[in-house]
Amino acid sequence: MAEPKTLFALNPDLDRAALAREFAEDNRIQVRNVLTAESATEIREVLSRHTPWGMAAQADGSGIKGAQKIDAPFLTSEAGREHAQQLLLATHKASQNGAYAFRYAHFSLVEAAARQDGNPFEILLEHLNAPSFLGLVREVTGISDLVKTDGQATLFGPQHYLGRHIDSHVAEGWRIAYVLNFAPDDWHPDWGGYLNFYDENGDITAGYKPRFNALNMFLVPRPHAVSFVSPFAPASRFAITGWLRDR
């Protein structure tokens, strides 16, 4: 594969041995300043100004089966807005009943890359599958057989959340879940949107604040969620998320 265009440059000063020791303690980590400042700023610019956001939602037990995705053009139509409102009500009901549900703004890097027109999302996905990034993740996690990264751009704005779940798709090759964060530097704890981890009793054992230029990684399956984003929070919790796979 040819080297992708510059958009994604890893911080050369990362202490990979220390990061590997930290990950080994509990099979999770938040790597701060993972990219160069210039690269992280450029990616946030792409996410904040040049991303056609659609909607992703799921509401188990509501009669709406599986994950639902609404692309940006349909979301601007009357029918799209009506469907989005139905999903909003369905996720409310599902979560009220203790079923798995989520809702957030979404854009697929995989679908954008399929256009093969050199768009920035295609370049991002190429970088996530390049030897430099895969090599970093292999070193930190100790999993040498990671061969592929998928990805989606996400925006968690007011009243968005991701319900507690475990990412059990091991048969599909999922090994490591990741969140590459581009939230504002001054994200306030009261705004929510934390990546939280849970024990078997439902208690939170750890939580990661959304931080600009921070990479969260953890071994799956593992109970986790993204906490509810407050109605008064800014719509700027940008991230690239997905899974690193062994097939």
Image: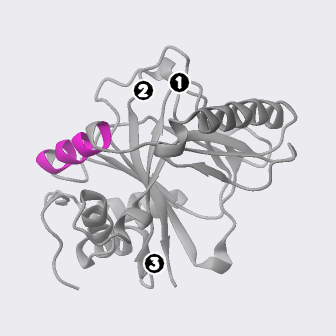
Which residue is pictured at 45% across the width and 39% down the height? 155
Residue 59 in the image: x percent, y percent? 76, 44
Depth-wise, is mark 3 or mark 1 nearer the camera? 1
Estimate how packed mark 2 is, as few (under 14), some (14 to 19) or many (20 or more) residues with alpha carbons within 10 Å.
Answer: some
* Viewer-side residue, 218 vs 243: 243
Residue 114 badge: none
Quadrant of the image occupied by residue 144:
bottom left
**Tag 2–tag 1 contact (CB < 8 Å):** yes
* Disc 1 residue type (three-letter): Pro
Residue 231 in the image: x percent, y percent? 55, 17
Q: Report the span colored magenta.
A: 38-48
Q: Is residue 209 above or below residue 68?
A: above
Q: Is residue 218 visible?
A: yes
Of the residues under marks 2 and 1, which one precedes in the sequence? Answer: 1
Which residue is pictured at 23% across the width and 60% down the height? 15
Residue 72 in the image: x percent, y percent? 47, 44
Query: Circle 2 — which element?
Result: loop
Which residue is pictured at 16% across the width and 51% down the height? 39
* Residue beneath disc 2: 235
Q: Find out whether residue 19 is within the magenta segment.
A: no
Q: Is residue 197 above or below residue 218?
A: above
Estimate how packed mark 1 is, as few (under 14), some (14 to 19) or many (20 or more) residues with alpha carbons within 10 Å.
Answer: many
Of the residues under marks 2 and 3, which one precedes in the sequence? Answer: 3
Q: Is residue 186 above or below residue 133?
A: above
* Residue beneath disc 3: 143
* Residue beneath disc 1: 158
